[in-house]
Amino acid sequence: MDRMNDKATVRQVYALAAVLCERAGEEFPETREAASELIERLRIETGHPAPRLQDRPYRRRGRPRRDDDGRASSAAAAELAREMR
């Protein structure tokens, strides 16, 4: 398997976000609410054409993923768990 063509890991995405926040003079958000507010403000400032999250219709997600023990987990949590092993 060619790992270089895999999607970015959760850790890589967080590291990239932290560097971009620092470069832009923004504090990295500590909570989901703070992250949503920062994303919304930056989208408005850059003229992003997509609607705000609260303006979009609710989208039901499929069944939660199950790990080897049968417990539900998100894809991001599963990826992080694999990386930490």
Image (tube, rainbow, N blue to C red):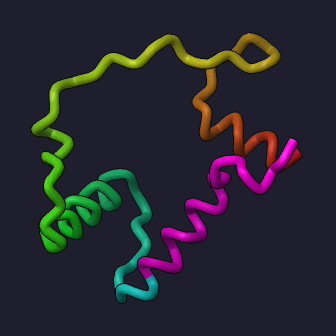
Counting from the top left corner in percent of width and height, residue 51 is at: 13, 46
Give the tally of numbered discs.
0
Image quadrant in which the C terminus is located: top right
Image quadrant in which the N terminus is located: top right
Q: Which residues are magenta?
A: 1-21
Residue 4 painted magenta = yes
Q: Which residue is at the front of the view, 28 or 9?
A: 9
Q: Which residue is at the front of the view, 16 or 29?
A: 16
Lateral position of residue 21 relative to residue 69, left or right: left
Counting from the top left corner in percent of width and height, residue 49 is at: 14, 55
Lateral position of residue 42 relative to residue 7, left or right: left
Occupied quadrant, residue 13:
bottom right
Lateral position of residue 45 relative to residue 70, left or right: left
Q: Residue at x 80, y 15 (%)?
A: 69
Q: Residue at x 81, y 41 (%)?
A: 82
Q: Residue at x 81, y 17 (%)?
A: 68
Magenta segment main secondary structure: helix
Q: Residue at x 45, y 85 (%)?
A: 22
Q: Which residue is at the front of the view, 23 or 32?
A: 23
Above or below, 23 against 28 in this view is below
Occupied quadrant, residue 26:
bottom left
Residue 60 painted magenta = no
Above or below, 23 against 36 in this view is below
Counting from the top left corner in percent of width and height, residue 12 is at: 64, 62
Counting from the top left corner in percent of width and height, residue 11 is at: 66, 59
Above or below, 33 against 57 in this view is below
Lateral position of residue 31 relative to residue 69, left or right: left
